[in-house]
Structures are given as structure tokens and as C-alpha cells.
Image (cartoon, helix red, strand yellow):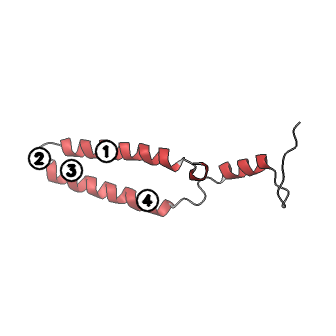
């Protein structure tokens, strides 16, 4: 077995990697995400009430772009900027 390096606290590199993965979303700002979701839902309701009698194409496009934005958000949040 190869010898693993330890820091001055006695934590080896494998333990450190596990700790980083375990606390990945510990410092995530859940309040900000909730506020953004609330603003999206309010905007969607306003758009729906403004375009209901004509057509709801704008609402469908708004939802589609929201889902595309969520996909990019998930990809970007999982990139470790310290290793770039």
C-alpha cells in the first residue's frame, strides 16, 4: 500500500477528499435560491394572466428557458473552480 501524506492535524488526502464531497452544499445559499424560485413563479403567474386569453406560447417559452437555465446552473455549480 502506498503511504498517504498527512497534514499537521493527521488528516490524510483520502479523508480530505471525502470531507470535501460530504460538505459540498453546506455553504449553499438556500434562501437566495428560494427567493429566485419565488420570483420565477410570480413572473410566470403574471405572464400567464396577461396572455391567457390569446395563447400561452410565452408561458411555455418562459418555462423552457427556466429549465435550460436550471441545467446550466447545475453544471456550473458542480465545477470545482480551484482545479481550473
Q: Give left or right: position of 22 versus 6.
A: left
**Discs 2/4, front:** 4
Mark seen at residue 53: 2
Q: How far apart are marks 2 and 4 (CA)?
A: 30 Å
Q: How far apart are marks 3 and 1 (CA)?
A: 15 Å
Q: How far apart are marks 1 and 2 (CA)?
A: 22 Å
Please give the name of the residue rendered at 54% of the width and 47% of the height, measured from the top-left corner.
Answer: 79
Q: Give left or right: position of 73 versus 24.
A: left
**Discs 4/1, front:** 1
Q: Quadrant of the N terminus?
A: top right
Please give the name of the residue rendered at 48% of the width and 44% of the height, measured from the top-left corner.
Answer: 75
Identity of the residue furthest to the left in this view: 54
Question: Which residue in the protein does label 3 denote?
Answer: 48
**Discs 3/1, front:** 1
Q: Earlier in the sequence, mark 2 or mark 4?
A: 4
Question: Which residue in the protein does label 4 denote?
Answer: 34
Q: Give left or right: position of 76 versus 48.
A: right
For residue 41, which quarter of the picture?
bottom left
Question: Which residue in the protein does label 1 denote?
Answer: 65
For residue 9, which quarter of the picture?
bottom right
Q: Distance between the residues labelled 3 and 4?
A: 21 Å
- Is there a contact, CB below 8 Å, between mark 1 and mark 2? no
Residue nearest the viewer, comparing 48 with 58: 58
Q: Earlier in the sequence, mark 3 or mark 4?
A: 4
Q: Find residue 80 and report its horizontal and vertical position in percent.
A: 58, 49
Amino acid at each position: 500500500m502506498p503511504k498517504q501524506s498527512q497534514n499537521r492535524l493527521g488528516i490524510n488526502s483520502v479523508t480530505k477528499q471525502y470531507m470535501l464531497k460530504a460538505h459540498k452544499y453546506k455553504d449553499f445559499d438556500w434562501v437566495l435560491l428560494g427567493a429566485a424560485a419565488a420570483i420565477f413563479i410570480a413572473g410566470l403567474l403574471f405572464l400567464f394572466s396577461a396572455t391567457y386569453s390569446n395563447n400561452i406560447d410565452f408561458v411555455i417559452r418562459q418555462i423552457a428557458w427556466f429549465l435550460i437555465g436550471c441545467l446550466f446552473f447545475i453544471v456550473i455549480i458542480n465545477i470545482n473552480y480551484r482545479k481550473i
